[in-house]
Every structure is written in C-alpha cells, then in structure tokens.
Image (cartoon, rainbow, N blue to C red):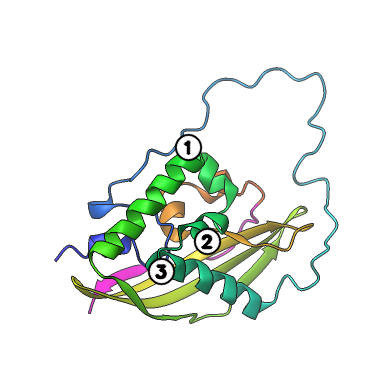
C-alpha cells in the first residue's frame, strides 16, 4: 500500500512532500549573488530593535491548539483558504510564491479526496514550547494523529512551529515536513538557539 501518499494529507495539511518523498515544488534557493556594499549598517537589525509586545496572552495554550486544529483539519475538509491563511509567509516565499504554494496545497487535498482520507483523531501529547526573540513570538507544538483512508490507517507524530510578530496576535505556521527540507534559520532567522524539537514518525496500523 502506498502509505506515503497519505503523508501528503497527514497531520499537516500544508505538507510539501509528495509520494515517495519527491518534492511537489522546487524550493527557491538562497541567492548566491554577493550583497552590495553598504555605506552604513542596516537600519533595523532583527536582534537589536525590540518590538513592543501588545499580545499579553501569547502563551495561551488553548488558543494555539485551536489554531493548529483548524489548520490540520482544513486539508481533509477541502478548506484550502484556511490552510493558506495559516501558513507563515516565509514558507510561501521560499517555495516560490503564493501561486506555487496554492498548487501544492491543492495537490495535497486532491490526494486525500481521491483516497477518502479523514482525520480520525488528533491530540497534543506534550505541552507547547514558547520562546521569543526581540521581534517575534514562537511556539513549537507536537501533534499525534491517526488518519483513515481507502489505503488503510496510519499513525503520525508531527509538529508545527508557529511564529508571529509581537505587535500582532495571529499565529502562522511552518510544519515539520517543510522544516526537514529548509533550515529553520532560513525560515525564521531570529529563532532562538537550543530549542528541542519533537520526534516525528509515520507508521501503518
């Protein structure tokens, strides 16, 4: 059975990995051109200009879980717009823009539809990890889900990394499958060092 197909519509509905691990879209490389000479230092270095925190409730676990569950269920429900809205803009930029990202999400949803995939269970086995930089709030949240489909049932352990500016309240996410292909510092340059990420696995039941 091609259980790898189900990974596409697994616990993360915006996974960019296709069947047999082949990328659905080509990640855009970092430019190799040398940076132009600057007459003065950057005007707003990420680590030296703290942003005022207007979201005093940013470590609300229930709020984060609600956003994550909304994101994870949207792929099974065919709600592409929710998936797009909750994807972090840096992910969209790295994969080549909104049109390519939308195409990838549509492929994920279509594979699930063809195989009658449904999210049987979704839970959060561990407390989320909240960290911050000068400008951003981050959360790492582990998930454990079971997916049922015409191909069988699979058990998935996965995680998301959420990020938002301190002056905003809306979380947006990058998933573990994406972060296996792209270093987290490329997605979130000011992500703090030393954060441990949950283990991931996929196994047939």
Q: Which residue is drawn at 51% across and 57% down?
A: 81
Q: Is residue 70 left or right of residue 5?
A: right
Work out whether mark 2 precedes mark 1 in sequence or the reverse, and give the earlier one: 2
Q: Which mark is residue 96?
A: 1
Q: Give the range drawn in magenta.
A: 191-205
Q: Residue 5 carries which label?
A: none
> Label 1: how many residues lie within 10 Å, few (<14), some (14-19) or many (20+)?
some
Q: How far apart are marks 3 and 1 (CA)?
A: 25 Å
Image height of 44 relative to 84, above or below? above
Instruction: Tell me if I can see residue 95 in this picture.
Output: no
Q: Residue at x 29, y 52 (%)?
A: 18
Circle 3 or circle 1, nearest the eye:
3
Q: Which residue is drawn at 26% across and 72% down?
A: 203
Q: Distance between the residues labelled 2 and 1?
A: 19 Å
- Front in this rendered view, residue 39 or 114: 114
Question: Does dot 2 land on a helix, a strand or a loop?
Answer: helix
Q: Residue at x 46, y 35 (%)?
A: 28
**Residue 105, image x, y percentages:** 40, 53
Judged from this view, the residue extending furthest toward the right is 52
- Front in this rendered view, residue 86 or 134: 86
Q: Name the residue under label 3.
A: 77
Q: In which quarter of the image is residue 108?
A: bottom left
Q: Which mark is residue 82?
A: 2
Q: Report if residue 16 lies within the magenta region.
A: no
Q: Do the residues labelled 2 and 3 touch (CB within 8 Å)?
A: no
Task: Check the picture and name the quadrant holding the C terminus.
Answer: bottom left
**Residue 145, image x, y percentages:** 38, 77
Is the magenta region chiefly helix, strand or loop? loop
Circle 2 or circle 1, nearest the eye:
2
């Amino acid at each position: 059975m091609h259980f790898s197909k189900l990974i596409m519509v697994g616990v993360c509905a915006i996974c960019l990995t296709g069947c047999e691990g082949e990328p659905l879209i080509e990640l855009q490389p970092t430019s190799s051109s040398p940076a132009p000479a600057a007459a003065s230092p950057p005007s707003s270095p990420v680590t030296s200009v703290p942003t005022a925190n207007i979201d005093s409730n940013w470590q609300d676990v229930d709020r984060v879980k609600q956003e994550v569950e909304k994101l994870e269920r949207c792929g099974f429900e065919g709600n592409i717009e929710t998936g797009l809205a909750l994807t972090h803009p840096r992910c969209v930029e790295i994969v080549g823009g909104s049109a390519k990202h939308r195409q990838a999400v549509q492929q994920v949803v279509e594979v699930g539809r063809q195989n009658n995939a449904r999210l049987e269970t979704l839970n959060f086995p561990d407390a989320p990890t909240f960290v911050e930089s000068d400008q951003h709030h981050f959360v790492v949240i582990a998930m454990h889900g079971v997916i049922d489909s015409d191909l069988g049932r699979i058990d998935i352990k996965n995680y998301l990394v959420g990020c938002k500016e301190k002056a905003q309240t809306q979380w947006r996410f990058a998933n573990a499958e994406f972060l296996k292909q792209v270093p987290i510092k490329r997605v979130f340059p000011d992500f703090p060092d030393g954060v441990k990420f949950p283990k991931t696995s996929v196994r047939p039941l």
